[in-house]
Image (cartoon, grey):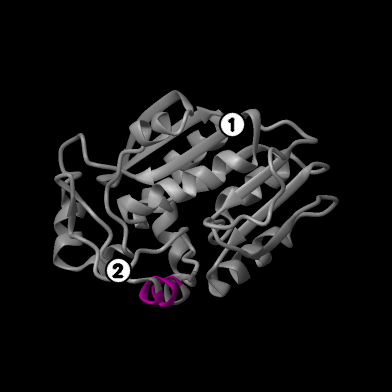
Amino acid sequence: MKLRFSCCGVSCCATPSFFSEGKLDARVSQDEIGHVYDRLSGVYDIWGKLTESRARRRAIELASIEDGQSVLEVAVGTGLAFFEIVQRNPSGRNVGIDLSTGMLSKARKRLGKLSGVQYELSIGTAFDLQVENESVDLLMNNYMFDLIPYEEMDMVLMEFKRVLKAGGRLILVNMTEGEKWGSKLYDFIYNLSPKAMGGCRGVRLSEKLKSHGFTVEVREYHQQLLFPSEVILARK
């Protein structure tokens, strides 16, 4: 089986339906996603700080990281969140994975500014986490599911559930469906050119999580520069 993963997480299959149950579905192929984010790696932080920083900051707050924990970030990107994780968990186990070598290079450069901390960064796939069963206290995942076809989300959530400890925390941040004025702009752009959005479209994950036995404790909507994000805290 060919595994699929991108800098933002798992990439989409070829020729998916444009809509799933009335919602936008993934429309950029696996190989294209990888190339897109390798090219974007040099400027991604600008976009992230302009449109995603508030949601990412809130996710770190909800994570309630304590030193000595086992933390896994899937789709680490340029390390914007991973840097904060490692700072808060310097003596714990911090593992970050991604597919994009360009994004990982940026993450390694960012984490190199820290000293006296423990972390691992490597190529990896959300479909097949190289992590022991029930070994992770906190799993962080930012802006990945908004790249995945709906029919493939279940496979990833099963893998997340496998590696989390009983009561383990799952933090998800994604582009979501717009709920306030102006936020539909990004759906319009996506319909014109999915690549212009880096392959991302709005998703809602609460019901998917519940169907896999997760308890959704927090779901918040954040909008920054009209860009809509949802932040979710769930427990296994």
Residue 109 screen position, x and y as percent: 67, 67
Kindly report the secondary structure that dominates the magenta region of the rendered protein.
Answer: helix
In the rendered image, which quarter contains the C terminus? top right
Q: SS class of the residue under badge 2?
A: loop
Q: Any magenta on residue 32?
A: yes
222, above or below 106, in the image: above
Residue closest to the eye, 163 or 176: 163
Of the image marks 2 and 1, the number of the one nearer the N terminus: 2
The residue depicted at 27 percent of the width and 47 percent of the height is 202
Q: Quadrant of residue 25?
A: bottom left
The residue depicted at 73 percent of the width and 62 percent of the height is 112
Q: Quadrant of residue 35?
A: bottom left
Residue under label 1:
169
Q: Any magenta on residue 55?
A: no
Residue 10: numbered disc: none
Residue under label 2:
28
Residue 48 screen position, x and y as percent: 43, 55
Tell me the kind of residue under disc 1. Answer: Arg
Q: Residues within 10 Å of mark 1 (few under 14, many from 20)?
A: many
Residue closest to the eye, 128 or 1: 1
Q: Which residues are magenta?
A: 31-37
The residue depicted at 72 percent of the width and 44 percent of the height is 87
Tell me the kind of residue under disc 2. Answer: Val
Drawn side of residue 122 relative to residue 41, left or right = right
Alpha carbons under labels 2 and 1: distance apart: 30 Å
Q: Quadrant of residue 192?
A: bottom left
The residue depicted at 46 percent of the width and 50 percent of the height is 155
Drawn side of residue 73 relative to residue 208, left or right = right
CB under 8 Å between discs 2 and 1 = no
